[in-house]
Structure formats: structure tokens, C-alpha cells
Amino acid sequence: MLTTRETGILGEETAAQSLEKSGYIVRERNVRFGKFEIDIVAFDPVQKMIVFVEVKTRTQYSDAYPIHSAMHYRKRRSMRKAIARWVMEHQYDGPARTDVISVSSGRVVEHLKDLGSEFY
């Protein structure tokens, strides 16, 4: 039985591999600014933009617990702060979006793209 942390690490690895297979360039992983974190920072070469990715890993997938319910207010606020810090430190002023990838049983089960301007 894996710990919650080990499950999360495997989920992030699965998500990063899936992004790379889809043509994204993974630039950074587990970017931390104190208690704020961005799981994956990638570049989407098709849309020519930075993508900030939150990975949600579950041991079992359930339609009763959809991915968007895991992005509660505190998590969105935390991501906004981490993204703002990343943008400032990299002096980035190009296009960006925020995605959420859900991983379960070792595979990506959902990839929600562009959660809107509330993040960036």
C-alpha cells in the first residue's frame, strides 16, 4: 500500500509523461514558493503558451467525486499566489493557462484545460 505522498508523486510522473507524449515541453516540476506550489509548469507548443498544471491523483476514480470538486477555493487561491510568484520571478508576460489533470490507477483519466482567468 502506497502512502498519500507516494501516490501523489506517481500521479505527477504519470501526468508529466502524458503531457510530453502530447507534445508539451515540461519545464519544471514541484515548483515551491513557501507553502504555495505548482505541480507542473509546461509549454504548449501548439498554443504557444505556458501551462500551469495541478495534478489530482486518486487511487480510484469516481464520477461521484468529479475533478473540479477537488479545486476548492483555498487550492485555487494557493495556485494563484504560486503562479503570480512564478510569473514575477521569471519576468514572464506571455500567454498562459491553468489546467488540472486527474490521474487514477496509473493513467490520466481527465485533463481539464484552461480553468479561466481566476488563476492568471
Image (cartoon, grey):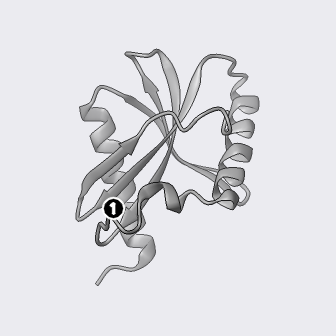
Where 7 falls versus 31 (above or below)? below
Residue at the image point whose x is 65% and y is 48% from the top: 79
Of the 4 image quadrants, the one containing the C terminus is top right
| Residue 99, percent from left and from top | 48, 40
Name which quarter of the figure residue 8 lies in.
bottom left
Task: Find residue 23 and report its horizontal and vertical position in percent.
Answer: 29, 25
Please give left or right for residue 119 compared with residue 44 in the image.
Answer: right
In the visual, does 49 lie left or right of 14? right
Q: Is residue 118 above or below residue 68?
A: above
Image quadrant in which the N terminus is located: bottom left
Relative image position of residue 2 (x, y in whole percent): 33, 79
Three-letter amino acid code at disc 1? Leu
Q: What crowding class fits label 1: few (fewer than 14 Cα within 10 Å), some (14-19), or many (20 or more)?
A: some
What residue is rendered at 65% in x and 51% in y? 76
Q: Is residue 93 left or right of residue 18?
A: right
Q: Farthest residue toward the bottom?
A: 1
**Of residues 104 and 118, which is closer to you in this image?**
118
Q: Position of residue 38 (x, y in %)?
A: 58, 47
Position above or below: 90 against 40? above
For disc 1, the marked residue is 10
| Local secondary structure at mark 1 | helix
Q: Looking at the image, which residue is at 31% across and 68% down?
A: 62
